[in-house]
Image: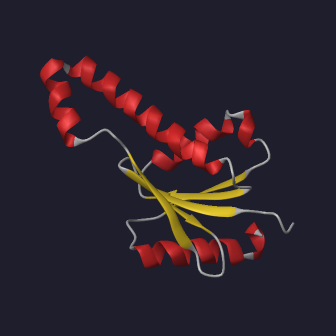
Amino acid sequence: MNGTKKVGVWMDYASAHIMEFSETPFEVKTIKSKFSSNEKANGLAKGENHLHSKERQFKADYFKEIAKFLLAYNKVILFGPTNAKTELFNLLSEDNSFFNTRIHLEETSKMTLNQRKKFVHDHFVNPLYK
């Protein structure tokens, strides 16, 4: 399948680092969540329910932005230290636009840029994921 486009996404709840697979994976884009500590302080001032509502909305917008970017790829590896990747996976699994996209999840710790690039490369050269 020569037209297969592969991408790795290291993510947590604050940011997603998207790396396209090639001989030397490179970072294509970084998407940041708009939910900041400043938003948290403003939300707390208005009440806990308001804070949780804002947090859910910002998270939904963050995941939608990542999903929109991933539409161009056939194979995706989501990895990172938090449950954000699992939440995004569940969202993508329910979206018919990703029906023909192979998506894998992997638990990892915090990683440097070079570690993320190596991880994406090693994942996609593995015969199980080709």
The answer to whether 118 appears left or right of 5 in the picture is: left
Q: Is residue 22 above or below residue 104?
A: below
Residue 59 pos. (x, y %): 41, 36
Q: How is the image coloured?
A: secondary structure
Residue at image coords 68%, 34%: 95
Q: Is residue 70 above or below residue 23?
A: above
Whether residue 33 is visible, yes or no, is: yes
- The single residue placed furthest to the bottom in the displayed view is 23
The answer to whether 16 appears left or right of 75 in the picture is: left
The answer to whether 20 appears left or right of 1 in the picture is: left
Q: Quadrant of residue 118?
A: bottom right
Q: Is residue 70 above or below residue 106?
A: above
Residue 64 pos. (x, y %): 53, 37
Q: Is residue 112 above or below residue 109?
A: below
Quadrant of the image containing the C terminus: bottom right
Q: Quadrant of residue 78?
A: bottom right
Q: Nearer the viewer, residue 120 or 67?
A: 67
Residue at image coords 80%, 47%: 100
- The single residue placed furthest to the left in the displayed view is 45
Whether residue 87 is visible, yes or no, is: no
Q: How many marks?
A: 0
Residue at image coords 37%, 66%: 110
The answer to whether 22 appears left or right of 106 in the picture is: right
Residue at image coords 46%, 32%: 60
Residue 1 pos. (x, y %): 87, 66
Residue 10 pos. (x, y %): 48, 60
